[in-house]
Image: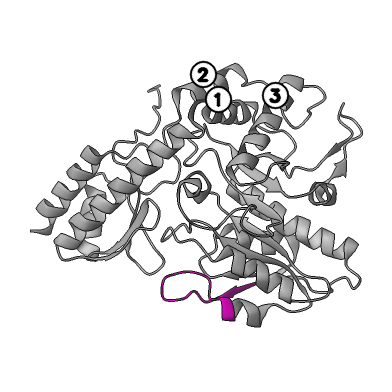
Amino acid sequence: MQRAVPQEFDRVLSSMCTDPHPAAREAAVRFLATNPGDPATYQSISELEAEVVAALGELAGLPDARGYVASGGTEANIQAVRAARNRARDEWVTAPETPNVVAPESVHFSFQKAADVLGVELRTVPVDGDYRADLSAVRASVDSETVLVVGVAGTTEYGRVDPIPELAAVAHDAGGDRPFLHVDAAWGGFALPFTDHRWSFAHADVDTMTVDPHKMGQAVVPAGGFLARDSATLDALAVDTPYLESTSQATLTGTRSGAGVAGAAAALDSLWPDGYREQFEESMADAEWLADALADRGFTVVDPELPLLACEIPDSLFEALRDAGWRISRTAAGELRVVCMPHVTREMLRRFVDDVDSLSK
C-alpha cells in the first residue's frame, strides 16, 4: 500500500492554518497520549493548559484569564453562544423565551452551526462599505431577547476588524439585562497585538473571545482558544463528570488533544511576543506587496488591513491557477482570497504572480 504523505504548504494560499513551529511539533509528539479533558488524571498537561490560557490572556489584554484550549474556532464560538444563552437563562431578571444572537454578516459560519445546535436565533446584519459591522444595523437588531452581540477581529474574507468598543457600547445601551459581547479573533488574535486596532479585553468590556494558536500562532492542529473574563462563564458551561477524577467539565468535547495543548504552549513560549511581531510585520509586508502587484496588473484589490487580501479576477484565471496547483479560495462575492500565513514567503508570491502573468495571456 502506498504510504500517504501530508499536504505540502508551498502552494497553499487559502488556509488559515500553517506549518507548525518546530518546537510545537516536538512538544506535540511528547504529549500524544494525554487527555486535558481529565485534568486531575493528566496533571502535567493540565499545568501546560493553564500556561497557555495565561499567555493568551496576556496577548488579549486579560491578566486573569479563564478558559481552555479548544479544538478550534468553531468550538470556541459555539461555547460563547452557549455560555451567553445559559447565563441569560440563569442570571437575568427576565429569562429570554426565544434567545437571539446579533452578528455582522461577515461572521464565521460556525455561528450558523451554533444557532442550529443550541436553538437560538442568529440575526446577521449588514456590514458597512469597508466590510465592518454596521453599528446602526446592530443597534436596530438588539432587543430584550438578545443574549449575545458578536464582533469579529480579523474577518475570514477581508481581514477586517469590527469596531469592538462601539459594539460594547451598543450592548451596554440595551439597558436592563444587557447582552454579552463576544469577539471572534480566531485568526486575527496573533496579529492584532502589533497594530493600533482596539479589539481586546483591554480595549472594551468583552465577555468572551476566540483566539486560535493553530492559526497565526503556529501551533499544531488542533489548538483553538476560548477565553472568558470571569469564572461565571465557565460555571455556566460546566457539567458534572462523576466517573472521572475531575468532578466537572466546562469544555464542549470530553477527550481533547494533549498534543494541541503542548504544541500551543511550546509555540507561545518560543514566539511571544517578538517572534510573532516579526512574523506579522513580514506577513503584512508580503500582503501589501501582493496587493500592489495585482493592482499594477489592472485587477481590483481590496487593500489588506491584516495579512489577507481579496482581488477580483476572471473566473477563467481563477480556475487556471487552481489547475496549476495553487490552493486558492473565493470570498462569498467571488473574489480571489489570499491569506499570507507564516508559510507564505515573498518568493512563493513571486511564483504566484508569475503564473498570473503567464495564465492571463
Does residue 266 appear left or right of residue 253 in this picture?
left
Residue at left 60%, top 53%? Answer: 200
Return the residue nearer the eye: 68 or 51: 51
Mark 3 to mark 1: distance in Å?
12 Å
Look at mark 2 in the image and give the residue it sits on: 26
Residues packed near mark 3 inside 10 Å, few (<14), some (14 to 19) or many (20 plus): many
The amino acid type found where label 3 is placed reads Ile
Which numbered mark, 3 or 1, is in the foreground of this view? 1
Spot occupied by residue 271 in the image (x, y as percentages of width and height): 48, 30
- In the rendered structure, find residue 266 and report the number of the disc placed on it: 1
Residue identifier under label 3? 45
* Residue 85 placement: quadrant: bottom right
Span colored in magenta: 122-136
Comes first in the chain, label 3 or label 1: 3
Count the numbered circles shown: 3
| Amino acid at pointer 2 | Glu
Q: Which residue is at 77% across, 21% downward? A: 43
Is there CB contact under 8 Å for labels 3 and 1? no
Circles 2, 1 touching at the beta carbon (< 8 Å): yes
Mark 2: secondary structure: helix
Q: Where is residue 161 in the image (x, y as percent from the top left)?
A: 49, 61
